[in-house]
């Protein structure tokens, strides 16, 4: 690694996964950015941290975000990339200021932004020159569903699937603690070789630019693990067909200008995850039925964002009225909400060198 001072900025968008029927498949990048301001100055010491990186964090739930590099999701993801490429720690003099407006555990892909930022950080620190598709292999070793990860890395509206890897490459299914080691992980289990290639495949779709994303964010967290634990192991054929039929229509309907609101509204319905998650999100069934293209002109569709509790409304106008209806329903259940109107982040993750 170089002995000169280096400065760069990494920006990674928030994301919304599923978009109704596309459970673990569809995602959109959103213009709300996790930012890392990175300085590597070999004349300054950063060895107060075991891996040589001094972190500062400003953002949502800052008190819950660890600053020690092997516990923090951004830096532990970067350390995984470094380790797989022959580096044991950050170069001396690494300082990172993290600014994070993406709320944690609310269904806006905060963990995906952190992992994508960390993998981009490892790539940049060690000057590995990986492209985004190769970096996605590293990300998918850490978070196994590609929807948020692909949207955060690539931006825009993205569909993805995981390849069926040959048996010798099944380390794509290793326990997370082998990838991001804890103090209890046996040393011989820690993964230090690069991941298999092409763990996933990705398709970027166009997006009808008049459609904006109204994100209504309840003030409580639902961890993705908890929100996945309530889902059944298997589904009935009618429920699977219901979702498949809608995904087939939705991926094209969201590209068309002008948008066909009624078609999109129906195509954003889901029977695979939302019904099972209503126990974790008070008022969810009522919220999903409360806003329609008839009651709120301009509304195209409504769904749970990712694993929740955020509600994603796609709309071309009447953003305030749409948000207010959802906010008022949550309020009746004693839940306060924040809300934002966001455009898609079309570029995904970016790295800017600062000279
Ligand atoms: N910038 C960050 N720095 C460190 N840790 C983070 C950061 N962002 C997220 N995390 C970790 O990820 C956890 C949230 O991940 P989780 O998958 O449960 O929700 P989410 O990614 O916000 O929502 P969803 O996956 O449904 O879109 C946080 O509690 C925190 O531990
Ligand atoms: N597809 C994932 C997104 C959350 O990370 C889920 O709904 O559980």
Image (cartoon, grey):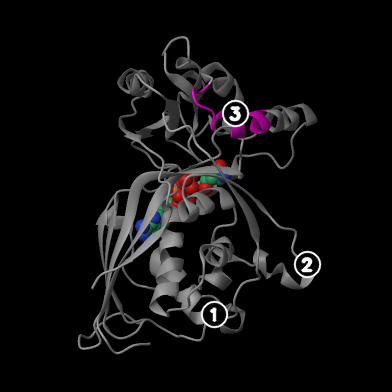
Work out whether mark 2 precedes mark 1 in sequence or the reverse, and give the earlier one.
Answer: 1
* One can see residue 72 in this view: no
Q: Quadrant of residue 93?
A: bottom left
Q: Which residue is outermost to the top?
A: 294
Mark 3 lies on residue: 275
72 in relation to 247, above or below: below
In magenta segment, residue 252? yes
Residue 335 percent coordinates (x, y): 34, 28
Ligand 2 neighbours mark 2 (CB distance < 8 Å): no
Q: CA distance from mark 1 to mark 3?
A: 41 Å
Q: Which residue is outermost to the front?
A: 257
* One can see residue 205 in this view: yes
Give the extent of the magenta segment: 246-259
Residue at 61%, 25% in the rendered image:
267
Mark 1 lies on residue: 84
Given residues 19 and 50, the one toward you in this image is: 19
Residue 143 percent coordinates (x, y): 55, 58
- Which image quadrant: the N terminus? bottom left
Residue at 58%, 52% in the rendered image:
146
Residue 215 percent coordinates (x, y): 38, 33
In magenta segment, residue 96? no
Dot 1: within a 10 Å radius of its alpha carbon, few (fewer than 14), some, or many (20 or more) residues?
A: some
Dot 3: within a 10 Å radius of its alpha carbon, few (fewer than 14), some, or many (20 or more) residues?
A: few
Mark 2 lies on residue: 166
């Amino acid at each position: 690694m170089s002995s000169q001072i280096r400065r760069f900025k990494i920006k990674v968008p928030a994301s919304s996964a599923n978009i109704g029927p596309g459970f673990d498949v569809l995602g959109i990048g959103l213009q709300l950015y996790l930012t890392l301001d990175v300085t590597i100055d070999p004349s300054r010491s950063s060895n107060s941290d075991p891996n040589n990186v001094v972190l500062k964090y400003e953002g949502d739930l800052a008190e819950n975000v660890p600053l020690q590099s092997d516990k923090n999701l951004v830096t532990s993801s970067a350390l995984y990339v470094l380790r797989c490429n022959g580096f044991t720690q950050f170069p001396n003099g690494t300082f990172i200021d993290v600014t994070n407006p993406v709320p944690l555990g609310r269904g806006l892909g905060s963990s995906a932004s952190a992992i994508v930022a960390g993998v981009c950080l490892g790539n940049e620190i060690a000057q590995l020159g990986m492209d985004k598709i190769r970096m996605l292999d590293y990300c998918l070793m850490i978070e196994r569903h590609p929807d948020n990860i692909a949207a955060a890395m690539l931006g825009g509206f993205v569909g993805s699937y995981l390849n069926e890897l040959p048996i010798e490459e099944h380390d794509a299914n290793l326990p997370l603690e082998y990838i991001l080691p804890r103090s209890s992980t046996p040393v011989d289990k820690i993964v230090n070789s690069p991941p298999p290639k092409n763990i996933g495949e990705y398709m970027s779709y166009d997006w009808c630019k008049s459609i904006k994303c109204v994100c209504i964010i309840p003030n409580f967290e639902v961890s993705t693990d908890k929100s996945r634990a309530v889902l059944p192991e298997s589904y009935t054929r009618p429920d699977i067909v219901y979702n498949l039929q809608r995904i087939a229509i939705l991926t094209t309907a969201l590209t068309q200008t002008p948008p066909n609101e009624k078609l999109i509204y129906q195509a954003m319905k889901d029977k695979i995850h939302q019904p099972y998650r209503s126990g974790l999100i008070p008022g969810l069934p009522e919220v999903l039925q409360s806003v329609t293209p008839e009651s709120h002109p301009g509304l195209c569709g409504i769904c749970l964002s990712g694993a929740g509790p955020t509600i994603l409304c796609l709309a071309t106008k009447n953003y305030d009225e749409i948000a207010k209806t959802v906010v008022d329903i949550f309020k009746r259940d004693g839940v306060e909400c924040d809300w934002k109107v966001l455009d898609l982040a079309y570029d995904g993750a970016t790295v800017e060198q600062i000279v």
